[in-house]
């Protein structure tokens, strides 16, 4: 059984949970990034590979990068590292937007 001091110490540092929630959010977003990479230009890549560029699934690629960003936002906003939920949510959405935009740029470059 844990002592009162250990429980008080853990209660005082809820931000430590970000050390596992953020990597989980990033890992859950990786399959969406992979699907976005295939969806931008098709299996032949954005050069077309001699078959032409297939762009029918660009909407899927955008949706996948947004979903990956929302997974990361959930991982950041769920941890009570700030007393104000609105501050946590605002910071999480800014970080998630940057992550989604980075995902769109990185997956579109292949």
Image: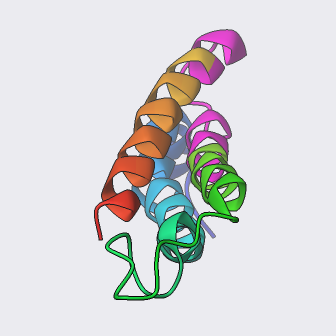
For the question of whether residue 9 can be seen, the reply is no
Foreground pick, 59 / 2? 59
Q: Is residue 76 magenta?
A: yes
Q: Is residue 4 left or right of 13 when viewed as pictured?
A: right
x then y, percent, for residue 34? 50, 76
Q: Is residue 95 above or below residue 5?
A: above
Classified by dominant secondary structure, the portion drawn in magenta counts as: helix
- Quadrant the C terminus occupies: bottom left
Foreground pick, 80 / 99? 99
x then y, percent, for residue 23? 44, 63
What are the residue bounds of the magenta stretch? 71-89
Q: Is residue 87 above or below residue 29?
A: above
Q: Is residue 46 left or right of 41 when viewed as pictured?
A: left
Q: Is residue 108 above or below residue 80?
A: below
x then y, percent, for residue 87? 59, 11
The residue lying at 54 percent from left, 29 percent from top is 92
């Amino acid at each position: 059984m844990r002592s009162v001091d250990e429980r008080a110490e853990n209660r005082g540092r809820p931000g430590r949970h970000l050390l596992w929630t953020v990597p989980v959010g990033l890992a859950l977003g990786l399959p969406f990034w992979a699907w976005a990479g295939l969806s931008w230009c098709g299996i032949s890549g954005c050069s077309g590979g001699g078959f032409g560029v297939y762009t029918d699934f660009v909407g899927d690629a955008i949706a996948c990068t947004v979903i990956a960003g929302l997974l990361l936002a959930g991982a950041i906003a769920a941890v009570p590292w700030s007393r104000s939920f609105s501050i946590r949510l605002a910071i999480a959405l800014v970080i998630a937007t940057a992550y989604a935009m980075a995902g769109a740029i990185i997956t579109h470059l292949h």
